[in-house]
Image (cartoon, rainbow, N blue to C red):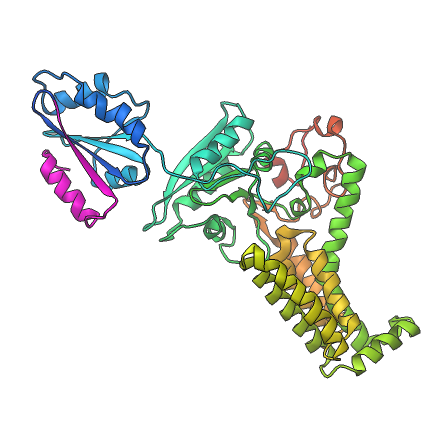
Amino acid sequence: MYNTIKENIKALYNITSSSADFTVRELNLSNGELSAVFTTEGMCDKKSLAISVINPMLGSNPDKRKGDELFNYIVDNVLSASEVIRINTFDEVIKYSMSGFAVLTIDGCAQMLAIGVQGFSYRSVSEPESELVQRGSREGFTEAARVNMTLIRRRIKNPNLVFETHTLGKVSNTEVCMVYINNKATTSSVEEVRKRLNACDIKTLLGSGYLVPYLEDSGKNEVFTGVGITERPDTLCGKLMEGRIGIIVDGTPSVLIVPHLFVENFQSVDDYSNRPYFAAIIRIFKFISYFVAVLFPGIYIALVNFHPDYFPKVLYSNIKESIDHTPLPLMLEVLVIVFIYEVMRESGLRLPKVLGHAVSIVGALVIGECAINAGIIGAPTLMSVAIAAICSYVVPDLYPQITVLRLSFIFSGGILGIFGIAALSVIVLVYMCSKSTLGVVFMTPLAPFSKRNMRDVFVRLGWKKLSEYDINVQSLKGGSLYEK
């Protein structure tokens, strides 16, 4: 940086290409010295800027101080802001000014000051739409990373709770915050996540999902992921207490959690608010729904095409009659219904809410009733796909994986029958058991199995029992979910 304000202003205008939201406020001090404040329009609070920076500067009496002496005097005696950072490069000026800071420069001094007066607009804290609960907090993460950090700190008032910021994205320069609890998360896990974030060479980071491949052990976009995601502060805090690590990305309300286990997709906040026996029933229903959503259409095709003797005679005669009156082969018929269902789901998801109801009505009347009456599709086939579709919504976190596996089992069942279903099941199971994140096996505690580890999988024990055990990532790596 330069010693004169004019050169600094000229250089910054060149760097920002004279962008309309880059503003400069020049100030003449009482001793005749010149200063300037650089800000980005809409990123800082103008009231805080006036109270903390401009008014104190104009009302100061620096006598005959100049250059570095004047700079130090302003830092120590004039500015009333609580956050003041000395900066020495133009890259830091751009970074802080575009993060809501006001950057102050003094004529004759090469250093500048970044003053915390952030005040950009953001969505207020509201209930997350993707993780609704009957009991529990109604607060959800917002797009502002600093607000999300506050929501976490309110729940864990512990000095061991650490927030560690990084800047990722060569073009976007997005703020990413790693959060963990010192005496819970292992040093090796924290170091590994920090290493992977620093090694991330992505150019633009606009959402938390961009980071998932960089946090995976394999570094590839696989079907299942060992990186969890949540919009609930209480869920994240519960995972932090187990030694997990959270990744907050500025600009998105979804926070990443590593490592993430398969069984955690079937757990919800309500499970810990309800009685244990009711939570156990709901969880068992969720596991059954998952297998039905994945396997039912494929098994239906395999049995009808290759093993019709497995059906009762009356039921098979009805299915056979329905198939005989439709023009398409059974597997192609199922694929058409799945395609139409996915198109309807996507259109209902993307359309405005007012039009979303129209999509459901059209789907129920036209595609359902009329298609069956016209003999285009069979009622048993439509029912099998509909049951699988409904069951897939019971475990929404696994919906993408369920869709991919459902199509895979439809093809394997339609081509190879029950043998294809069994073979693909073994392949998927071996793949899931071999997957790990940060050294923690994805299928823990089911594989490797330990009876002592099953306290919060299918059946949840009462809080008096669960509170006797401490959960940490180190025990996960050793195959033990709870250490006494």
Identify which residue, 370 or 432, lies in the foreground: 370
Image quadrant assignment for residue 47: top left
Q: In which quarter of the image is residue 472?
A: top right
Seen at 67% across and 73% down, the residue is: 335
Query: Residue pushed farthest right?
Result: 313
Residue 305, given in percent of the width and then of the height, sits at 79, 77
Q: Residue at x 65, y 59 (%)?
A: 402
Q: Is residue 226 magenta?
A: no
| Rendered-image quadrant of the C terminus | top right
Q: In this view, does 258 lie to the left or right of 297?
A: left
397 in relation to 274, above or below:
below
Q: Is residue 422 visible?
A: no
In this image, 52 relative to 376: left or right?
Answer: left
Magenta region: which residues? 1-29
Query: Residue 222: horizontal and vertical position, in percent?
Result: 55, 58
Residue occupying the point 65% across, 44% down: 264
Seen in the picture, residue 427 relative to 241 is either above or below; the reply is below
Q: Which of 42 and 448 is in front in this view?
A: 42
User: How far from the left and from the top, in percent, is residue 258?
Assistant: 54, 43
- Which residue corresponds to the image point at 65% horizontal and 33% vertical from the top-left? 136
